[in-house]
Amino acid sequence: MQETVHNDPAVNWLLQSDDPSIRYLTLTEVLGKSEDSPEVESAGKQIPQGPKVQLLLSGQRTDGGFGVHPYQKWTGAHWRLVSLVELGIPSGFRPAVKATDLVLKWLLGESHLSNVPKISGLYRRCASQEGNALAVCSRLGIADDPRVKQLAESLIGWQWPDGGWNCDRNEDAKHSSFNESLSTMWGLIEYYSATDDKDA
C-alpha cells in the first residue's frame, strides 16, 4: 500500500516541493515514515529555513512579539505560533519559544483571568485561545513550565458537563461550542502526550 502511495503523482509532487515543511509532512503524515529515517531528518532540519516559516517569523522583535497584541488576527504571536507548529518546527526552536512568553503573559494576566464569568453554573470562556497556546507550548518542549500547567488546569476547571467549552454569555446557552472545544482538545492531547499528566 505504501509503495502505491509513494508512486502517486500527487505525492511525488509534494515530495519535490521547495518547502521543507511540505516534504516533512508528506513523509510523516502521508507515507508514515519514521522520525529517525534519513529523509525525515533531512527535511526536518531544513524546516526553520523554509519560506513559510521565515515569513511567519519576519518582523519579530526582541521581546519575542511582532509589535501587535498577541491575539491580533492574523499577525499576532498567537496565530503565528499555531502556524509554525503546524508546519513542523522542531521542539525548542528558539524564536518560537521566545514568542510564547508574550502569549502566556497575556493569557495568564489578571485582566484576562478576571474576565471568565460563571453564568447559570457554567464558565463562559473562549477556551480555544488557551487550547492553542497549550498545544503550541507542548509541541515546543516547554510543557513543564508552571504557566503551561496552569493553562491545562484552567481548561479542566472551565469544562462544561457535555465535555466541551463555550464563551456564549447567553444564560440559556447549555451546550458547548465545537469551535471552542476543538482547539482546546488539541491542546490537552498535546499536553498529555508531552507530560503523561493523567489529570489533563
Image (cartoon, grey):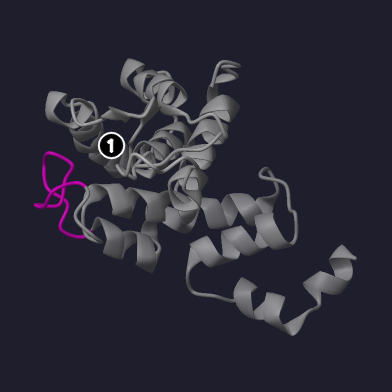
Looking at the rendering, in which quadrant would you find the N terminus? bottom right
Q: Nearer the viewer, residue 77 or 13?
A: 77
Between 12 and 138, the one lying in front of the other is 138
| Left or right, residue 135 beside residue 64 | right
Nearer-the-camera pick, 119 or 138 = 119
Image quadrant containing the C terminus: top right
Asked if the magenta segment contains residue 12, the reply would be no
Q: Residue at x 34, y 45 (%)?
A: 168
**Is 154 drawn above or below residue 71 in the view shown?**
above
Task: Work out whether residue 62 can be spotted.
Answer: yes
Residue 174 placement (x, y as % from top left): 47, 40
Q: Nearer the viewer, residue 90 or 196?
A: 196
Q: Residue furthest front?
A: 172
Principal SS element in the magenta part? loop
| Side (left or right) of 21 relative to 106 | right
The image shows residue 177 at horizontal and vertical percentages of 46, 48
* Residue range highlighted in magenta: 58-70
Q: Residue furthest right?
A: 1
Would you name the residue on which mark 1 appears? 100
